[in-house]
Amino acid sequence: MDTEVSRDKLKMYTPSIIAPEPRSKRMGLAEMLGLKSNVIPIIAGPCGIESKEQLKSVGNYLKSKSMKLMRGGAYKPRTSPYSFQGLGEEGLEILREVGEMYDLITVTEVLDVRDVDIVAKYADVLQIGARNMFNYQLLKEVGRQNKPVLLKRGVCATVMEFLYAAEYIAAEGNKKIILCERGIRTYETSTRYTLDISSIPIIKKEIDLPIIADISHSLGRKDIISPVAKAVFAAGADGIMVEVHPNPKEALSDGFQQLDFMEFTSLLEGISSYLKAY
């Protein structure tokens, strides 16, 4: 009975912009960002930009692994007001400089309507974090930008609410939207959040947008990141987001879930082998 109710609720979602009828050819992540089809779609980088030296180290490493997408937080939404909040515009300047230096597409979060223009000035992709998925004014504002928007699912959001949030962006004219499953809050405590892998095929049946999974923030641990990454791709995800840091033990935020270079290399090799065989 509960399953039927859930299905009925999903049917209430009547897409008008991001899922046209008849359905158009699905635009994948590589096509949306102008990547070559042989590039493994992984958005990697530190949780927070801490210094130019730190991000240059990450950028150089990602370049050596033929990666094309780099994330890095300049404005950090932290649970505690006393935690590292990011470098702000200085961090954005570093992000752009390192991105240009190593020919990397940059992704960073915008927290406030007042910061949209300045973040868009420096970053290639604007990220809306889980905490702001319901911030409709912010969604509208990034919808007016001519840059791809990476929209993360809120921790308490249903699939239907997630899709409507994407509609807010598209309704303003910006259809370059990348959805990101980031995990939802449940009773389970073995991971930071519960990664709702089932949302990936469900969403791909409903709309014509690429969807990735943030396997770092959803798990909050790195010992199971490789099998989960493979499961995400098996479910049909267009890519993943993972945090990488030169020295996670010294990271100013979320060091426990960030991979060092050796760990990321191992993850990349495992994913590459899996995708070739899949």
Image (cartoon, rainbow, N blue to C red):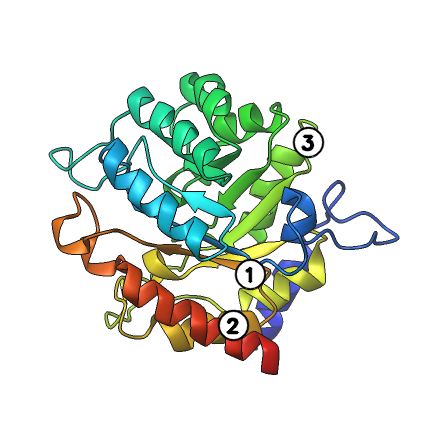
| Residue named by callout 3 | 171
The answer to whether 17 appears left or right of 86 in the picture is: right
Q: Position of residue 64 (x, y in %)?
A: 43, 54
Q: Secondary structure at mark 2?
A: helix
As shown in the figure, which amino acid type bears the numbered disc 3? Ala
Quadrant where the N terminus sits is bottom right
Q: Give the crowd class for mark 3: few <14, some 14-19, many >=20 residues within 10 Å.
A: some
Q: Are marks 1 and 2 in contact (CB under 8 Å)?
A: yes
Residue 67's place in the image compared with 194, above or below, is above
As shown in the figure, which amino acid type bears the numbered disc 1? Ile
The residue located at (44%, 49%) in the rendering is 63
Per the model, the C-alpha gap separating discs 3 and 1 is 30 Å
Question: Who is closer to the viewer here, 192 or 10?
Answer: 192
Asked if residue 122 can be seen in this view, the reply is yes
Per the model, the C-alpha gap separating discs 2 and 3 is 37 Å
> Which numbered disc, 2 or 3, marks the residue that appears first in the sequence?
3
Question: Who is closer to the viewer here, 87 or 193?
Answer: 87
The answer to whether 177 appears left or right of 81 in the picture is: right
Q: For residue 272, which numbered disc appears in the image?
A: 2
The residue located at (62%, 23%) in the rendering is 144
Q: For residue 40, which numbered disc appears in the image?
A: 1
Residue 229's place in the image compared with 25, above or below, is below
As shown in the figure, which amino acid type bears the numbered disc 2? Ser
Q: Which of the 4 image quadrants contains residue 83?
A: top left
The residue located at (29%, 44%) in the rendering is 57
